[in-house]
Image: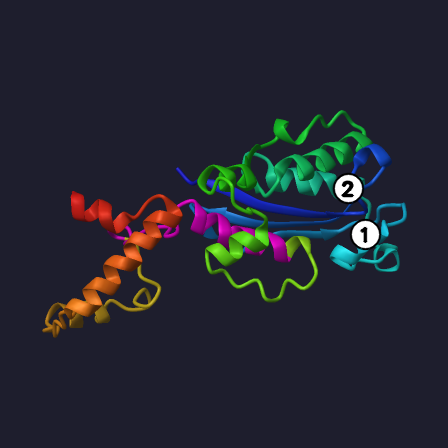
Amino acid sequence: MSVRQIVLDTETTGLDTAEGHRIIEIGCIELMNRRPSGNNFHQYLCPDREIDEGALAVHGISSEFLADKPRFKDVVHDFLGYVKGAELVIHNAAFDVGFLDYELQLSGNNFGCINDFCAVLDTLALARQKHPGQRNDLDALCRRYEIDNSQRSLHGALLDAEILADVYLAMSGGQTRLLLDEGEPNPETAATGATRERRAGMVLKVIRPSEDELDQHRAWLERLERESGKCLWHQLEDA
């Protein structure tokens, strides 16, 4: 059974829906069985209100840029159809879910709340569980898991969703699969069966690691297990 997850981020006009703040950007990255599928969702939205200076300094999205963009109510059916049945992966989920629920409320038609359409996984709660007492904002997690976020001079919903997808995969286990499933075509050899036939008669040279290389490998596995909580290589060794 395929597992469908959607890594989601939003940008807003401010911090509090109680003050009438609205969503101005939604970015979503779809993961199928922990692999990016390329079926993403990205939309800028006209909020029909001014953007707080503090929020503008964070994301740099101006009212002028948003003036000709659709309203949330114009895209609500497309958005709900996209997320329905998936698990949303969100950093500090209470914030984004609160804004999504507020937008659904303003859209009318008794849409309910986002949890009526999909489950929600909060990566901030996951990070705090794995790294108690440490900073667990997205930038800190990028440094911890050695994920490049050098393009993140300003926040952006789609860019932040892409970065969070990398963080989530690293934090929740790293590798998606150690080996290809038996019988699954290799993209490099799917075009022809000749490669597989040639390999059947090949004699491969075995290069064994030195003791120094083995020590470096063990150290790397120990670091991986400390940071992710699970190392598939160790599990295979113990099997």
Q: Position of residue 156 (x, y in %)?
A: 69, 56
> From mark 2 to mark 1, how far is it between C-alphas?
9 Å
Q: For residue 178: magenta?
A: yes
Depth check, front residue: 224 or 164: 224
* Residue type of the residue flagged with mark 1: Gly
Depth check, front residue: 150 or 184: 150
Q: Write down the residue under mark 1.
A: 54
Q: Which mark identifies residue 1?
A: none
Q: Is residue 121 left or right of residue 108?
A: left
Q: Write down the residue under mark 2.
A: 15
Q: For residue 37: magenta?
A: no
Q: Is residue 20 left or right of residue 195?
A: right
Answer yes or no: is residue 123 visible.
yes
Asked whether the beta carbons under mark 2 and mark 1 sit within 8 Å of each other, the answer is yes
* Residue type of the residue flagged with mark 2: Leu
Up-down relation of residue 52 to residue 154 (above or below):
above
Q: Position of residue 31 (x, y in %)?
A: 49, 48
The residue sitting at 71% across, 33% down in the picture is 98
The image quarter in which residue 211 lies: bottom left
The residue sitting at 56% across, 46% down in the picture is 7
Report crowding for label 2: few under 14, some 14 to 19, many 20 or more residues within 10 A (C-alpha). some
The image quarter in which residue 153 lies: bottom right
Up-down relation of residue 157 to residue 84 (above or below):
below
Q: Is residue 237 left or right of residue 230?
A: left
Up-down relation of residue 192 to residue 62 (above or below):
below
Depth check, front residue: 109 or 13: 13
Q: Secondary structure at mark 1?
A: helix
Q: Which residues are magenta?
A: 159-183
Q: Is residue 20 left or right of residue 149?
A: right
Q: Position of residue 140 (x, y in %)?
A: 55, 53
Q: Position of residue 55 (x, y in %)?
A: 79, 51
The residue sitting at 78% across, 29% down in the picture is 105
